[in-house]
Amino acid sequence: MKHNMEIDGIEVTFSEGETILEVAQRHQKEIPTLCYDPRLEPFGGCRLCIVELEGARNPVASCTTQATDGMVVRTATDTIEAYRKTLLEMVVSENREVDVSPLRGYAAGELADLRDKYAVNSTRMAGAKSGTNKTEDDNPFILRDYELCISCYRCVRVCAEQEGDHAINVMNRGFHTQITTEFDGLLKDSACTFCGQCIQTCPTGALADKKALRAVDEVADAMPDKTRTICPYCGVGCSVDILTKNEKIIGIHPAMDGPANQGALCVKGQFAYDFVQHPDRLKTPLIRGEDGELHEATWEDALDKVAEGFRKVNAKHGRHSIYGIASGRAPSEAAYLMQKFIRVGFGSNYIDNCSRA
Amino acid sequence: MSNPLVDMQKPEVIFCIGTNMTECHPVAATGLKKAIARGAKLIVADPRRIGLAELSHLYLPLRVGSDTALLLGMAHVIAREGLIDEAFIENRTTGFDEFFEHISQWTPEWAETITGVPARDIETAAMWYGSANKGAIYYTLGITEHICGVENVQSLCNLALMTGNIGREGTGINPMRGQNNIQGAGDSGALPNNYPGFQAVTDPEHQAKFKTEYGREIDLEKGITKVTALELCGDSIHAMLIDGENTLLSDPDREHCEHALRALEHLVVIDIFLTETAELADVVLPAAAWGETDGVCTNTERRVQRMRAAVPPPGQAKPDWWIICQIAQRLGFEGFDFDTPKPVFNELCQVSPIYAGLDWERIDKSEYQWPVPHKEHPGTPRLHEESFVNGRGIFSNVHYRDPAETISDDFPVWLTTGRRLQSYHTRTQTGRAQGIDYLLPEESLEVNPADLETWELTDGEWCKMSSARGSINIKVKATNRSPRGTVFASFSFADVPVNLLTGSGYDPITHTAELKVCPVKLEPL
């Protein structure tokens, strides 16, 4: 059943259970958020998404308030925008750095974008700061720059709600707030599986992709190119965006709209991509020589040798002496052509793939 | 999978058997965790106390290779307690009366003697699954990599059919596929028994169709499986073309496998690295890798998705499709003059009824799950909603069989194998990804702490592990994940080639190797 409400003077419909923020976003209202990740339960921590609700004494957080019939909401009055600016000033003042490399993570630029949009700086609220970097954590994947942390708890919540790992939590309160593992140790010694979801949801780059940062010199404004594809590992088929720069893969972002993963990834999909660039990659065809060793060769020579070998075996032993094994790792075009090669070429069904092992 | 991945959040009761999902399909496991958070009950049957077992409400630690007995016992209880879905059985299935008769003898008490799982836990599992309005089954290779893989799957089908837990949201029989495009490889016809789209090669209609499509007579009988082909190497098989498989490390009984490949007169391997298998080849052809080539893959829920090139391949490496076309053209074969992968995929769609409604453009947004029989069809997220493809669901009167080899005085320990979260298969990829070594630097043998003394082993020290086929050295790791009398290792590390030991037997129908069961002997080094 559809319900009606009014947002900024316009009558809109919504479904049971939707929050004001969700309805507003569906109608292209730009409501600022920091602690909000659409994949997680509403949290209401940062208060930036406040809106005016007719009949309510104070502004309400639109991310935690469910839409109800007849509601009248104003999303961007002068008062609301002033509140937001003050809230942002406080957040920014606590933060040592706001302009961070986009390679830190999928959402790393959210705070900087809002700072620019609301033209705030840290001077008016300058003072105490929270968070201490966990420099002793030498893991190769997740940088723990908690000096940039704004205590939005997105990392804690994504770890618990999205991944179900519960590896990190919040220690202390106020200016002493610190995101940490049990007994304040290394991620390796916790329940962390290094899926990287905390990196990708962090809105300030406090948790960052160490591997991507290692890959190129950190340049804050240099956004890498993105190519949408599917993870090369298991059969779940998670959608990812490959980040590239100068024809080199420098990182992976989960595709938040990927139908199989809805933004989730595991350690392999997130971090085990650089085999592609490993020096061990085969770069030329190889032919076994008279000496019994494999030697580099041209495609012409290699393909001739391949064809000659199949021709000889076919002539000597017949068409049922030739077998093809297709890959479960290569694209379907390869598997299709492998079976076509055997069936068209030799008229047999002597073809299989690697699924029996 | 009969059901889509999004359904994983929706069952009331989830029955996971032979699937180490949090390590092997971690993102799929997040769906189950969400279901549990919403109140779903999780039953886990696995010989090892895996991560999923820790999350479960009921854990059934069955002996390796005893799945059929467990599932017969559960079917017995479901029938005895009247938890069957009579309307579903009446309208959608056949053979229930005989099956009902058959399972009356397989009591949970009998199953306990085979599986080691207490009869009352088998009863509880059956009661939970049988009573659920939405009960879903998930399994992986722990079910199929046995000599009785087919019976195991049939036993799971029996449970779903008798309770009507199929064809609806949050139900189903859901095998998780282990490789990014293993589903697509089968869909594409790289099978000895099927043309593309699972059209049986023995069906006269399909034979006629492909005779026309491919312009020649093709054998009317099935081909041999890879397992048989490897056995016949040097005998009747003399040449092989292998694309992207490290057969030597991933297949059972490595010595037999190496001997087989060496016996070939002509071995051509297409791969991205000089794998242990490629090292045996007469010609090695360098392929473009993931991220370097455009193409299509199909995931475990039958979703057909585009892979896209982001960077050029190194040196002279070329996409697989190009390489195969070049070989075919040099041999004078017709129908291989392709310039891009797009017309190749479109040809696959044209000859395959399950892809008939698809083409290169239509799959751009990953929207379709096959079957998609025509262009107006929205795809099929959930199979078997109205009916089964072959008419009625058939109950199978299966019997329990012992594994090919069982423990003895010579080999008194059960070895079972699998993957780990941080490494993938034979580590040709993850072994070359920076940082992975920090999390998993080496392989180890997981041994129950209470077993150390019995076998004179020391935690962290090396031991010699032998089966009827060979011996390897491996470091011992004491952990309660392994039950008493059973040890575990992955086959990922080349320096600990666990598949030297495996290979005791194969499922007679699918020829899938019994990689999950291998009696071994352990000695300190």
Image (tube, rainbow, N blue to C red):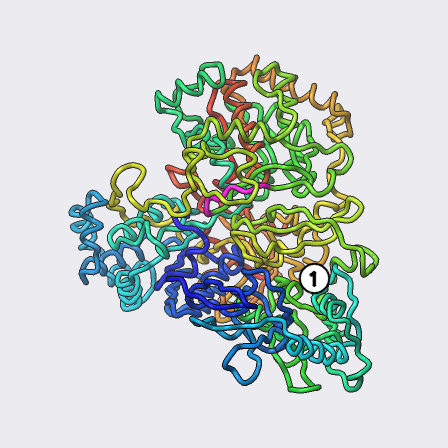
Q: Is B474 located above or below residue A41 in the figure?
A: above
Q: Is A281 located above or below residue B79 in the figure?
A: above
Horizontal side, residue A62 vs residue A15: left or right? right
Residue A265 lies, in percent from the top left, at 59, 57
In terms of image quadrants, where is residue A306? Answer: top right
Residue B110 lies, in percent from the top left, at 25, 60
In terms of image quadrants, where is residue B462? Answer: bottom right
Horizontal side, residue B7 vs residue B312: left or right? left
Q: Determine crowd level at label 1: few under 14, some 14-19, many 20+ residues with C-alpha closer than 10 A.
A: many
Q: Range of the magenta residues?
A: B301-306
Residue A302 lies, in percent from the top left, at 72, 24
In the rendered image, residue A129 lying in the magenta stretch gets the answer no
- Give me the chain letter of mark 1: A
Q: Mark 1 points at which residue?
A: A105
Given residues B125 and A335, the one toward you in this image is A335
- Callout 1, which amino acid? Gly
